[in-house]
Amino acid sequence: MSTAKSTPHTGQQRPGNRWPVLLCWIAVALDGFDLVVLGAVIPTIAKTQALGFTSASLTTAATVGLVGVGIGAIAIGPLTDRYGRRRCLIGCIAAFSLFTLAIAVAPNVATFVLLRFLAGLGLGACLPTALAFMSEHAGAGRGGTAVTRMMTGYHVGAVLTALVALWVIPNLGWQWMFALGGILGLASLPVMWAKLPESEAYLRVTQGEAEPARSTDVVRGAYRRISLGIWAASFMGLLLVYGLNTWLPTIMGQAGYSLTSGLTLLLVLNVGAVIGLLVAGSIADLRGTKATVLAWFGLAGIFLALLSIRTGSSLLVHAAVLAAGVFVFSAQVLVYAFVGHLYPPAIRGTALGMSAGVGRAGAIVGPYLGGQLVATGVAYPWGFYLFALAAAIAVLALATVPPAPARDHSGMLGSKP
């Protein structure tokens, strides 16, 4: 039987099929879970010195997990381009879930850290695979909206995990946070196996309707210039996302705000992120992805710089933080949407994996640089200057990327970015 025919497992997507949207959203929500779960349990682990953890080993666990995520993102690209989006996404969620579940029964620090790294490999591979799937599942001219709305799962997952932690940790213990994350991931697998089809664009490549490409094509010929600009912007984008989420309350504390006010501003920042994700994709589809992502990073830099100005108005500060959240987080997601426009299906998974993987390096550097500024007592206002500079570098990097997609290997141009 030809793989072109629809089956429950590998069939082409039918118009109106909502299962891929929901299941990819769930995959991204698991990423949101991982964003906050370690931060939620660290105070308890540090206080009780569970498993023999120290401040230094907790930092190692956090860093090693992010390293695993970056490696997983880069490694999955060639695999998803070769073996398909569906099998890779299901396999990655299975790996992440099993290793996360195992963390709940880790007997010592070394095992905990190793399992965080292995779980990171699986989790890091989920995002670029889901992004590739959604960029191909969306209808013509709807890629930006599909990708940005899928990424709301990231923030919803983070918020729900933080809320669940308020009850689970004091009543059941910190280990149950990892157990729940693993159980929920495993529970999604039967539904994904039954309802997630294969990407139609990938199937066209496997059926010979589009010429296959090599993974190295992302850094060859016309794609080299595109890739370098995208990688730089992704690095700066995730530097902003993780740097702000990690240090905003502390920086505002150096500016004279209370801890409660700082945490409230962090919530406002992430509310802005959801608002930005809901509107950015539609604007990108209407006005063009490149023009929108350039404007988004530029406006992010402006509002971040404005936060360095002291004001007696709490309303103005909250408005500036909300605006920064609107533009910072969705600017990074628009980079992924731009990748979906610029590369052909044969190497789209590799391109998204490389973009996400390089970006994860920024996710490590951002909190590190913020921590250095905090340690020296100059995080306010220089932290905001640093973040504004990162946004400006992203603008310059994306300005070098051609506005139109490169010609793909079937000789057809991609959709207008």
Image (cartoon, grey):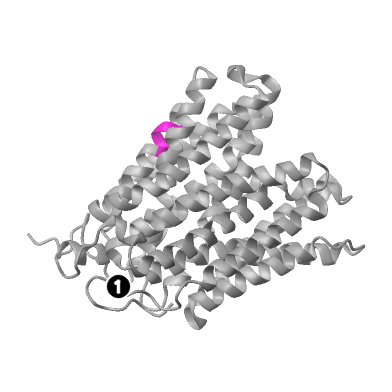
Residue 186 rendering spot, x and y as whole percentages: 38, 39
Dominant secondary structure of the residues highlighted in magenta in the image: helix
User: Image height check: is 407 above or below 192?
Assistant: below
**Magenta residues, start to end:** 96-100
User: Image height check: is 45 above or below 234?
Assistant: above
Q: Which residue is pictured at 62% across the width and 43% down the height?
A: 162
Most extreme residue toward the right is: 312
> Within 10 Å of the Cα at label 1, are there few (<14), some (14-19), or many (20+) other Cα atoms?
few
Q: Is residue 94 visible?
A: yes
Which of the pair 398/336 is nearer the observer? 398
User: Image height check: is 322 above or below 46?
Assistant: below
Tell me: 204 left or right of 415.
Answer: left
Residue 39 rendering spot, x and y as whole percentages: 63, 38
Most extreme residue toward the bottom is: 287
| Amino acid type for the residue under numbered disc 1 | Pro
Residue 139 rendering spot, x and y as whole percentages: 36, 75
Judge whether residue 360 is colored magenta: no
Instruction: Locate the C terminus and report the quarter of the image it occupies.
Output: bottom left
Tell me: 96 left or right of 45.
Answer: left
Q: Which residue is mark 1?
A: 15
Which secondary structure, mark 1? loop
Q: Which residue is pictured at 49% across the width and 47% down the height?
A: 31
Residue 294 rendering spot, x and y as whole percentages: 57, 73
Tell me: 98 left or right of 209.
Answer: right
